[in-house]
Image (spheres, coloured by chain):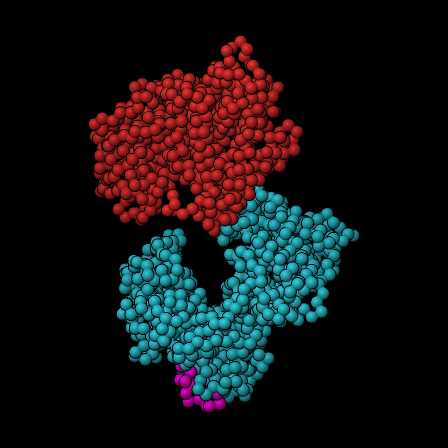
């Protein structure tokens, strides 16, 4: 049976103990963000997620969204939940205080996001998309647009969308056809069709603000001719309240594998009134400031689902008795031993756990860097953080969501037939997690982004923010008595990653297809090494704190999970290295007509 | 060349002065004369002023300050008798027949028998110049047409008159070739000779076509520029550079002197836009600007370009052309730019084909003139070969353009071919003839036609250049040095030891080597691949050292840039035969590093042995520190000798084409009774000296000359040059110094400020002063 308790202990561990959360409050603008303020936020978030969102997850999945006469109805209970969520201030926790937000650090917000996604990903889509629209508008909108649209987006009375995809253009946005024709009053008439628009139409908010990619009449071809426009569902009147209906309507909704309670809409724009956001033809740039954070958020979605699945699987494995332990009877008072005694069940549970905790540590690391990037007064520190975030974004997105799909799948496997039937909610996690590997740039695109853009940029400068601290850590601790056994496997995998990176840079420069052939395996290799580094760091922290106050069980479990990761997961890097070194010929030499 | 011992140049304008400077660069004394300005206190003021200007010219006109002292200023009233000592008298005065002929009569009265007189005219036919002058003058007279600037432009067009003695032409031609380093191209006595005849037509067609097609100047320059192998200034950028005011003069002169049927007349027409620009002072870069200008209005700096239709300036924009790769593809590309490219190039190339044999006897001369006179990467006939003669002829017919006789003769055959390993060109009679290289010219490109490399990998190759000499060639991008270069050099040392007598390090790229592959190094540093980087450093040290002590002589033969690791390999050669235009330097400090492929140890040894310095261990250390810490680059081979990047015994070759043959001769010379050098010992001053050098650097820092990171780098360099923690009672070996180089290099390469410098050089081409 699915069950969820927010992993607050582990969240506090990554926030304060692993990544020095206290440092956050030394950044200008975050002075108040100490644990006194942040801990209650996490506890409150846990309550809302456990008590309000989690109970709606299963019924929302069963009921789904309904489309009638241009109107989308979300599942029962969602409107009330959204009201509570909004009134609790959760829509604006990470937003700029100038527009009514609470200005919480990204490092905290991403933990809250994890809880929301763990308990009800479909629900999370609605405020999640609003936040994306908020980010793009906040970074690139004119003051007038910001004054008018940001406050209701922040307080959640209005929601937002991102309208990118069209029927013939998904990954390749350069093919976008939606038109924007200037009008004498400075607005634009937007005409075209957008598909796969999450939260495009619903009855949760009084207005919906669409951010739409479209072409101006004089636009150059390709992605350098795309501009970003703001198109509200209702045009605000002079008082700022929603007024007359704009020329945008939902044509239908999609019937999907998962996230069924999230409305995925076809949106038709028919000379809808819109306003330019940012400069003409610079829409892709505006979109990408938002896209990086969105990609991180999608990674966090995977993390949340994997955590939820892990908790359900562990509860079941403790409870379910079946057969006897191979090592002798463990529960003589029962008809059989609980299945948690079996090596293979443990393999599955530990794989899930090591993935989840490793990802959470990486996620907190990157979120912390985003806070430095946003708030640090030191330009060099900001640029270093920006490099690091740029490098890690595709890894977080693809690694977290791939591992989430594997973990939720294991969650079902642990429960056997009881996982497969809908009643226990375990198969929903697989279906819900599946989309995270696809949207905001498929994981294949993430891998190409890593090898094609992030690696070569500035002769590999972004890499420095990862390789230098990791290399220095290994050099400093490989021979430590207690930590060494965790650092040496990291060192071995690190060398593989260095060699693979060098190989891709050398060969991929001359032959991009070779880099493309290596991309996905390389991203996984990178991700595993990043996790190994985080695991070694977690052991370092845990070893230092063991025996210093009543949390020894937590730290011992950390160290034990690290051991599992180093011995049972990290060796995959050896295979990945061989696969990468085998080159692209086995893929590209295969005759196309033989497929 | 021994028989031209003194030269006179009359006319101290830009060309005359530049020619005089370059004669001085060849080590030959030269008298520079001009008229006496009215009422001047200094009667040599014009010539003296020209020399002063030459000394400030950028790029430099003189190869060394010493050379400047070889130019003696004078005037045509008091100093004409000095011509009596000169073997060659170059006239470079105003383009007026009466002035020139009056001067010739005065020259004829004083010059010594058998001396040669030549004019640098570009517009007056030789026959006109000598008309009415005594036969004795005409026999010793020719035209020598230099290109601007004379030091750097390698083309010399030479026109012989009907009466000119062949020995006079031979004498001047040989001097120009060997001593001045020019490629001498014989031309007929026709207007514009070769390069300007075709070049002026090309520019005129390109301007007129761009106006008619309504093209932006940026687009025109972007298409009839780099994609054609033409310098990226294209057409309008080039006109801005040479000066718009020249255009009407040159065009008028061409229009006057070319026969009625010449295609030039079809391209020539008055252009109101240009007339207006000239009237307003827009003469190009030397004036207020030209087709491009820098608008400083309002204290800003806005790059602007002219709109050919309206004549108004507007902000310059990046050309938005989606051009295919390859010349042929560009000429067929749809759209305005493709049509423009075809119109300009079709007419230019077919005009070139009409000019043989009118202006030159062979096509190779035309190609050479355009390559060296206009810096085209390919001459017109090489371009036609890239298109295919039959394709080009067919396209000309389709476009309603005449097909020149020479192109018909080619009948689908290439203009150039390689037969039995020899390069041949199609003659005007339709048969192929070998392209002869003068004695003393050896080109690797020719050798490659007939042979396969002895060794080869992605970064280098080894060739057999005959007589038991091998040639090691860098082949990587920009000839940067990487582990593959070292691996092949290491292999080559073994092979040469077994099968050859000597080795020459040489290549025919524009630059010998820009040094180690910094992109690869930076990437490795970003990856924290420290042991790999240290391995690269150590391998380079060992390879260069093995080369130095190989059992056969090694001669370096650089031309162009030889920086960093590219300089260090030359420092390890037994001898260097350098092209005069070689720019050597240990520039590592500029990117926050120090020379670590033995550069420090070699320079220390040179200054200790060859430098004329006070006694004691400190002066050589200070001298090398001064040169290396400031990343000084010698601006010529002669200057490299002053800085001891070259030894006084190393040779300098003026003509690029003669470099390999000279180096090979040097190598064979050394191969007789060759013994490898004895490893040097080093007595170095140790830590106190390092402290002293650091203090000096700190004073530069306080004066704002050295940056914060300069101090870090200089500190590391000082430690190496001072010999680490040695003292003068101890003796260090080469290996001790190599270890110091390596250790300090490894310390610097981990420094984020060093990485930022490397990144800046790679990304912007500019050093970062952090």
Q: Say if the magenta span includes residue B766.
A: no
Left or right: where does residue A496 sit relative to residue B278?
Answer: right
Q: Residue furthest bottom?
A: B135
Q: Residue furthest right?
A: B729
Q: Is residue A411 above or below residue B690?
A: above
Left or right: where does residue B159 sit relative to residue A281?
Answer: right
**Quick check: can you spot residue A486?**
yes
Chain B: its colour in the image is cyan
Chain A: its colour in the image is red
Task: Give coordinates of residue B722: x percent, y percent.
Answer: 70, 51
How many numbered discs? 0
> Residue placed at 45% from the left, 80% from the top?
B159
> Residue placed at 41% from the left, 20% from the top?
A417
Task: Out of B588 and A362, give the one closest to the viewer.
Answer: A362
Question: The N terminus of chain B lies in which quarter of the figure?
Answer: bottom right
Task: Out of A342 and A152, give the one closest to the viewer.
Answer: A342
Q: Say if the magenta span includes residue B128.
A: yes
Q: Residue furthest top?
A: A333
Task: Give coordinates of residue A212: x percent, y percent.
Answer: 30, 37
> Residue placed at 41% from the left, 72% from the top?
B415
> Residue placed at 30% from the left, 58% from the top?
B334
Task: Give coordinates of residue B553: x percent, y percent.
Answer: 66, 65
Q: Is residue B438 above or below residue B630?
A: below
Q: Is residue B1 above or below residue B511?
A: below
**Quick check: can you spot residue A190?**
no
Task: Out of A595 and B306, give the one closest to the viewer.
Answer: A595
Q: Magenta stretch? A: B123-140
Task: Give coordinates of residue A85: x percent, y percent.
Answer: 36, 21
Left or right: where does residue B92 sit relative to residue B503?
Answer: left
Left or right: where does residue A533 sit relative to residue B493?
Answer: left
């Amino acid at each position: 049976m699915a069950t969820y308790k927010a992993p607050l202990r582990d969240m506090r561990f990554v926030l304060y103990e692993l990544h020095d959360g206290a440092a956050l409050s030394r950044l200008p603008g975050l002075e108040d963000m100490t644990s006194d303020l942040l801990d209650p936020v996490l506890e409150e978030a846990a309550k809302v997620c456990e008590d309000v969102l989690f109970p709606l997850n299963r019924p929302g999945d069963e009921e789904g969204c309904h489309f009638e006469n241009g109107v989308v109805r979300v599942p029962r209970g969602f409107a009330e939940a959204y009201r509570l969520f909004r009134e609790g201030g959760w829509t604006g926790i990470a937003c700029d205080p100038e527009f009514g937000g609470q200005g919480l650090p990204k490092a905290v917000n991403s933990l809250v996001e994890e809880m929301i996604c763990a308990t009800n990903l479909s629900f999370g889509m609605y405020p999640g998309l609003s936040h994306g629209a908020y980010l793009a508008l906040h970074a690139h909108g004119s003051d007038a647009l910001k004054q008018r649209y940001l406050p209701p987006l922040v307080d959640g009375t209005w929601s937002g969308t991102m309208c990118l995809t069209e029927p013939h253009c998904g990954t390749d946005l350069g093919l976008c056809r939606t038109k924007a024709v200037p009008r004498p009053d400075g607005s634009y008439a937007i005409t075209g069709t957008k598909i796969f628009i999450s939260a495009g139409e619903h009855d949760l908010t009084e207005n919906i603000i669409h951010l739409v990619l479209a072409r101006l009449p004089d636009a150059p071809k390709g992605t350098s001719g795309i501009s970003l426009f703001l198109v509200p569902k209702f045009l605000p009147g002079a008082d700022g309240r929603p007024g007359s209906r704009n020329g945008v309507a939902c044509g239908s909704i999609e019937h999907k594998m998962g996230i069924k309670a999230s409305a995925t809409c076809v949106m038709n724009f028919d000379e809808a009134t819109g306003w330019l956001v940012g400069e003409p033809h610079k829409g892709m740039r505006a979109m990408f400031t938002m896209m990086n954070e969105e990609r991180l958020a999608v990674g966090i979605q995977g993390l949340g689902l994997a955590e939820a699945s892990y908790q359900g699987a562990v509860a079941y494995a403790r409870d379910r008795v079946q057969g006897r332990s191979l090592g002798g009877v463990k529960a003589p008072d029962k008809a059989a031993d609980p299945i948690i005694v079996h090596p293979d069940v443990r393999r599955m549970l530990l794989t899930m756990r090591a993935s989840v905790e490793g990802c959470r540590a990486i996620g907190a690391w990157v979120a912390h860097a985003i806070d430095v990037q946003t708030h640090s007064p030191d330009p060099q520190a900001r640029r270093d953080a920006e490099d690091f975030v740029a490098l890690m974004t595709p890894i977080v997105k693809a690694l977290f969501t791939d591992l989430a799909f594997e973990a939720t799948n294991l969650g079902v496997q642990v429960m056997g037939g009881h996982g497969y039937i809908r009643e226990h909610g375990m198969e929903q996690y697989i279906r819900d997690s599946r989309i995270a590997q696809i949207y905001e740039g498929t994981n294949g695109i993430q891998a190409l982004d890593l090898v094609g853009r992030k690696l070569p940029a500035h002769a590999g400068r972004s890499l420095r923010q990862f390789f230098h601290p990791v290399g220095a850590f290994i050099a400093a601790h490989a021979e430590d008595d207690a930590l060494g056994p965790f650092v040496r496997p990291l060192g071995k995998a690190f060398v593989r990653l260095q060699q693979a990176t060098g190989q891709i840079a050398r060969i991929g420069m001359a032959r991009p297809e070779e880099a493309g052939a290596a991309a996905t395996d390389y991203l996984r290799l990178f991700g595993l090494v990043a996790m190994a580094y985080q695991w070694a760091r977690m052991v370092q922290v845990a070893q230092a704190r063991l025996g210093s106050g009543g949390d020894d069980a937590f730290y011992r479990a950390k160290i034990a999970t690290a051991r599992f990761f180093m011995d049972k997961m990290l060796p995959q890097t050896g295979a990945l290295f061989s696969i990468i070194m085998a080159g692209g010929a086995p893929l590209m030499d295969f005759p196309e007509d033989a497929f | 060349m021994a028989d031209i011992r003194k030269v006179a140049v009359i006319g101290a304008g830009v060309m005359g002065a530049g020619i005089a400077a370059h004669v001085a660069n060849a080590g030959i004394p030269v008298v520079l004369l001009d008229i006496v300005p009215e009422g001047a206190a200094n009667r040599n003021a014009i010539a003296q002023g020209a020399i002063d200007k030459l000394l400030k010219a950028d790029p430099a006109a003189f190869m060394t300050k010493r050379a400047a002292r070889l130019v003696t200023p004078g005037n045509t009233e008091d100093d004409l008798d000095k011509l009596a000592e000169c073997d060659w008298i170059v006239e470079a005065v105003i383009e007026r027949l009466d002035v020139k002929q009056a001067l010739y009569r005065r020259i004829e009265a004083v010059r010594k028998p058998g001396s040669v007189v030549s004019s640098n005219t570009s517009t007056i036919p030789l026959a006109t110049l000598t008309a009415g002058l005594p036969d004795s003058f005409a026999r010793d007279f020719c035209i020598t047409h230099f290109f601007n600037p004379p030091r750097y432009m390698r083309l010399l067009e030479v026109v012989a008159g009907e009466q000119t003695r062949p020995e006079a032409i031979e004498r001047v031609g040989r001097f120009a070739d060997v001593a001045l380093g020019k490629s001498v191209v014989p031309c007929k006595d026709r207007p514009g000779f070769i390069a300007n005849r075709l070049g002026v037509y090309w520019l005129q067609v390109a301007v007129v076509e761009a106006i008619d097609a309504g093209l932006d100047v940026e687009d025109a320059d972007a298409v009839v520029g780099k994609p054609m192998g033409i310098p990226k200034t294209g057409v309008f950028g080039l006109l801005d550079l040479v000066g718009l005011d020249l255009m009407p003069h040159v065009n008028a002169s061409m229009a006057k002197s070319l026969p009625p049927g010449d295609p030039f007349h079809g391209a020539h027409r008055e252009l109101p836009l240009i007339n207006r620009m000239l009237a307003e002072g827009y003469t190009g870069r030397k004036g207020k600007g030209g087709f491009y200008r820098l608008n400083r209005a309002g204290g800003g700096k806005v790059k602007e370009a002219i709109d050919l239709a309206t004549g108004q300036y507007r902000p310059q924009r990046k050309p938005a052309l989606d051009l295919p790769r390859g010349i042929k593809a560009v000429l067929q590309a749809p759209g305005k730019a493709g049509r423009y490219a075809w119109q300009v190039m079709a007419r230019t190339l077919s005009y070139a084909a009409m000019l043989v044999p009118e202006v030159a006897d062979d096509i190779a001369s035309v190609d050479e003139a355009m390559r060296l006179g206009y810096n085209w990467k390919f001459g017109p006939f090489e371009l036609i070969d890239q298109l295919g003669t039959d394709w080009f002829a067919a396209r000309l017919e389709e476009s309603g353009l005449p097909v020149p006789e020479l192109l018909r003769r080619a009948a689908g055959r290439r203009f150039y071919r390689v037969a039995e390993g020899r390069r041949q060109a199609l003659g005007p009679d339709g048969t192929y003839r070998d392209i002869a290289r003068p004695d003393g010219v050896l080109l690797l490109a020719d050798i490659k036609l007939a042979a396969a490399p002895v060794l080869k990998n992605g970064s280098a190759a080894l060739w057999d250049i005959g007589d038991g000499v091998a040639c090691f060639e860098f082949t990587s991008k920009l000839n940067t040095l990487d582990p593959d270069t070292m691996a092949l050099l290491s292999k080559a040392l073994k092979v040469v030891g077994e099968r050859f007598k000597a080795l020459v390090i040489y290549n025919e790229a524009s630059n010998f080597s820009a040094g180690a592959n910094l992109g690869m190094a930076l990437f490795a540093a970003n990856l924290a691949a420290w042991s790999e980087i240290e391995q690269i450093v150590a391998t380079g040290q060992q390879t260069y050292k093995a080369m130095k002590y190989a059992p056969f002589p090694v001669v370096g033969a650089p031309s162009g840039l030889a920086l960093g690791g590219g300089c260090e390999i030359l420092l390890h050669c037994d001898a260097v035969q350098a092209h005069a235009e070689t720019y050597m330097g240990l520039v590592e400090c500029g990117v926050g590093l120090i020379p670590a492929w033995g550069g420090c140890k070699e320079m220390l040894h040179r200054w200790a042995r060859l430098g004329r310095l006070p006694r004691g261990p400190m002066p050589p250390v200070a001298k090398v520190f001064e040169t290396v810490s400031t990343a000084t680059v010698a601006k010529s081979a002669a200057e490299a000798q002053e800085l001891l990047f070259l030894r006084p015994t190393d040779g300098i070759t003026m003509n690029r084409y003669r470099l390999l043959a000279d180096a090979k001769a040097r190598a064979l010379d050394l191969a007789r009774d060759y013994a490898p050098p004895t490893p040097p010992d080093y007595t170095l001053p140790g830590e106190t000296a390092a402290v002293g050098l650091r203090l000096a650097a700190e004073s530069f820092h306080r004066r704002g000359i050295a940056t914060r990171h300069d101090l870090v780098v200089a500190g590391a360099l000082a430690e190496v040059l001072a010999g680490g923690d040695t003292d003068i009672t101890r003796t260090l070996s080469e290996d001790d110094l190599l270890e110091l180089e390596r250790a300090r290099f490894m310390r610097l390469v981990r420094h984020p400020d060093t990485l930022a410098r490397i990144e800046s050089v790679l990304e912007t081409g500019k050093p970062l002063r952090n």
